[in-house]
Image: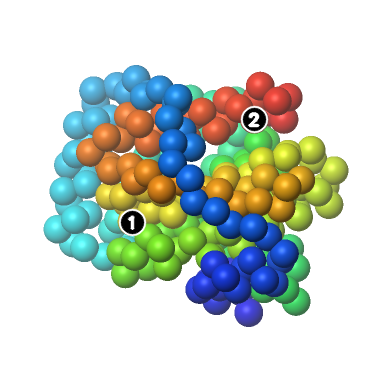
C-alpha cells in the first residue's frame, strides 16, 4: 500500500485517529503576490498549451511546476523544492510512495530534511479524489519531522489540477486536518503564489527556516 492507495478521507480518519473538517477562508487574510510580467506572460502561454494537450503530465510540466518554482524563488535561500521523489516513512501503514512535489524548510537540495508542504496532482481532474492521498502525505511529513527532531507543528497540503488549487492544513498537536473550501483558479495565480509564499514565510517566522 502507498500514498496513492488512500482514496477515502473516512479511511484516513479511522486509520490515523484524525479529525477532518472543512472550513472557509483558511487564507482569507493572505495577500496576492507581486509577479513579474514575463512570468505571467509565459504562464498564460504554457497554461493554454497544457489545457489544449489535456494530460496530467502536460499540466504538471507547464502549469504546476512553473507556479511552484516561482514561489520557491522568493524563499530559495531558506527552502528547497522536490519533484517526484520517493518518500518512505512507514510503509507498513501505507505512508510510502512517490510524491509529486514537496516544499521543504531546508536549503539542502540533495536530500529531503524538513517537509512543510506536500502537493498532489489530482487524477482525472478530480480534486476531491486527491484529498486522501494528500492527507496521507501530510501525515508522513509530520511523522518524518518528528523523527528528525524538527519542531514543525503545522504541515500544509495542496491538491491541484493545475488550473484549480485547493489547500489543506494539518495541525499535529490537535490531530486535526482542515480542508479549505475555497477554490483558487490559475487565472488568479497571484493569489495562489501568495498563499504558497505565506506558507514558506510562516515557517520562517516560526524559526523553522
Q: Residues within 10 Å of mark 1 (few under 14, many from 20)?
A: many
- In primary-sequence order, the first of circles 1 and 2 is 1
Residue at (71, 66) in percent of width and height = 16
Splitting the image into 4 quarters, where does residue 201 fall? top right
Residue 142, image x and y in percent?
Answer: 71, 51
Asked if residue 62 is positioned above or below residue 123 in the image, the reply reads above
Asked if residue 162 is positioned above or below residue 105 in the image, the reply reads below
Residue at (52, 72) in percent of width and height = 8
Q: Kindly tell me whether residue 200 is visible in this rendering.
A: yes
Disc 1 target residue: 161
Q: Secondary structure at mark 1?
A: loop
Q: Residues within 10 Å of mark 2 (few under 14, many from 20)?
A: many
Q: Nearer the viewer, residue 18 or 161?
A: 18
Left or right: 132 as drawn, with respect to 107: left
Q: Kindly tell me whether residue 61 is visible in this rendering.
A: no
Q: Nearer the viewer, residue 116 or 37?
A: 116
Q: Secondary structure at mark 2?
A: helix
Residue at (23, 38) in percent of width and height = 187
Asked if residue 112 is positioned above or below residue 10 in the image, the reply reads above
Q: For the C terminus, which image quadrant?
A: top right
Disc number at residue 203?
2
Residue 62, image x and y in percent?
Answer: 29, 49
Residue 106, image x and y in percent?
Answer: 67, 36
Q: For the N terminus, which image quadrant?
A: bottom right
Left or right: 31 as drawn, with respect to 41: right
Left or right: 55 as drawn, with respect to 14: left
Between the residue at mark 1 and the residue at mark 2, the CA separation in whole angstroms equals: 25 Å
Amino acid at each position: 500500500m502507498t500514498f496513492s492507495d488512500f482514496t477515502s478521507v473516512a479511511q484516513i480518519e479511522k486509520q490515523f485517529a484524525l479529525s477532518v473538517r472543512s472550513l472557509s477562508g483558511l487564507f482569507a487574510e493572505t495577500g496576492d503576490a507581486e509577479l513579474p510580467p514575463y512570468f505571467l506572460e509565459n504562464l498564460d502561454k504554457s497554461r493554454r498549451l497544457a489545457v489544449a494537450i489535456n494530460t496530467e503530465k502536460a499540466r504538471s510540466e507547464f502549469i504546476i511546476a512553473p507556479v511552484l518554482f516561482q514561489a520557491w524563488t522568493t524563499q530559495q535561500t531558506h527552502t528547497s523544492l522536490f519533484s517526484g521523489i520517493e518518500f518512505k516513512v512507514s510503509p507498513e501503514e501505507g505512508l510510502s510512495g512517490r510524491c509529486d512535489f514537496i516544499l521543504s524548510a531546508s536549503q539542502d537540495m540533495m536530500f529531503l530534511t524538513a517537509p512543510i508542504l506536500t502537493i498532489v496532482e489530482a487524477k482525472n481532474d478530480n480534486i476531491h479524489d486527491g484529498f486522501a492521498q494528500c492527507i496521507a502525505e501530510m501525515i508522513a511529513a509530520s511523522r518524518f519531522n518528528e523523527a528528525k527532531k524538527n519542531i514543525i507543528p503545522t504541515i500544509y497540503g495542496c491538491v491541484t489540477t493545475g488550473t484549480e488549487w485547493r489547500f489543506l492544513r494539518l495541525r499535529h498537536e490537535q490531530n486535526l486536518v482542515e480542508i479549505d473550501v475555497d477554490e483558487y483558479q490559475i487565472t488568479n495565480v497571484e493569489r495562489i503564489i501568495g498563499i504558497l509564499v505565506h506558507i514558506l514565510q510562516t515557517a520562517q517566522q516560526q524559526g523553522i527556516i
